[in-house]
């Protein structure tokens, strides 16, 4: 596997930090790991690409697919992609922001995810 993924929890908001290269050889494993990391009670997922050096078309497809799956469940996907990141240009070209907004910092992404969580109505136990 050319990429490592590490998961953190920030007050109920899952964050996946991907280090290395995301391509056809490892995207299936990454996709499964990321989908399994998001519980139905989480507001969504933040993927931190700060330490990602390469992202091919299979990686782009997985981001859009994951974003759509989360959106269908009422959750959101936010990406941490500093402007100096090697993957920033490709994510801008494919207009990933339409489904998974990019943020410069983890703090910005977590703030957006928390704001989304506040907007989602909670089921009340009667």
Image (cartoon, rainbow, N blue to C red):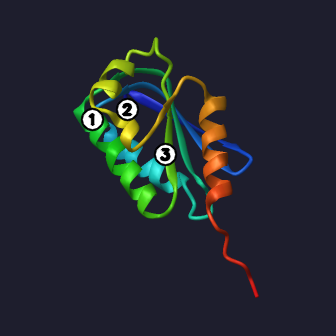
Q: Is 81 in front, or is 38?
A: 81
Say which residue label 1 marks: 25
Q: Secondary structure at mark 2?
A: loop
In this picture, residue 62 sits left or right of residue 114 = left
Q: Is 1 in front, or is 72?
A: 72
Q: Nearer the viewer, mark 3 or mark 2?
A: 3
> How many tags in the picture?
3
Question: What's the distance in space between the residues labelled 2 and 1, CA to CA?
Answer: 7 Å
Label 3 vs 2, first from the N-terminus: 2
In this picture, residue 26 sits left or right of residue 7 = left
Question: What's the distance in space between the residues labelled 3 and 2, CA to CA?
Answer: 23 Å
Pointer 3: residues within 10 angstroms few (<14), some, or many (20+)?
A: many
Q: Is 35 in front, or is 88?
A: 88
Q: Position of residue 78 (x, y in %)?
A: 51, 40
Say which residue label 3 marks: 77
Quarter of the image for residue 93 reads top left
Label 1 vs 3, first from the N-terminus: 1
Question: What's the distance in space between the residues labelled 1 and 3, CA to CA?
Answer: 23 Å
Q: Looking at the image, which residue is at 35% across and 36% down? A: 96
Q: Looking at the image, which residue is at 39% across and 47% down? A: 31
Q: Position of residue 15 (x, y in %)?
A: 59, 40
Q: Which quadrant of the figure contains the N terminus? A: top left
Q: Looking at the image, which residue is at 45% across and 53% down? A: 35
Say which residue label 2 marks: 1
The reply to whether dot 1 and dot 3 touch (C-beta < 8 Å) is: no
The reply to whether dot 2 and dot 1 touch (C-beta < 8 Å) is: yes
Q: Secondary structure at mark 3?
A: strand
Q: Looking at the image, which residue is at 34% across and 25% down? A: 92
Pointer 2: residues within 10 angstroms few (<14), some, or many (20+)?
A: few
Label 2 vs 1, first from the N-terminus: 2
């Amino acid at each position: 596997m050319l990429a490592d993924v590490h998961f953190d929890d920030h007050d109920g908001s899952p964050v996946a930090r991907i280090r290395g290269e995301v391509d056809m050889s490892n995207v299936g494993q990454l996709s499964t790991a990321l989908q399994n990391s998001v519980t139905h009670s989480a507001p969504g997922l933040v993927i931190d690409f700060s330490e990602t050096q390469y992202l091919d078309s299979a990686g782009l497809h997985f981001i859009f697919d994951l974003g759509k799956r989360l959106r269908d469940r009422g959750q959101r996907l936010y990406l941490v992609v500093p402007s100096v990141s090697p993957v920033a240009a490709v994510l801008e070209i494919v207009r990933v922001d339409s489904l998974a907004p990019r943020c410069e910092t983890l703090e910005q992404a977590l703030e957006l995810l928390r704001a989304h969580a506040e907007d989602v109505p909670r089921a009340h136990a009667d």
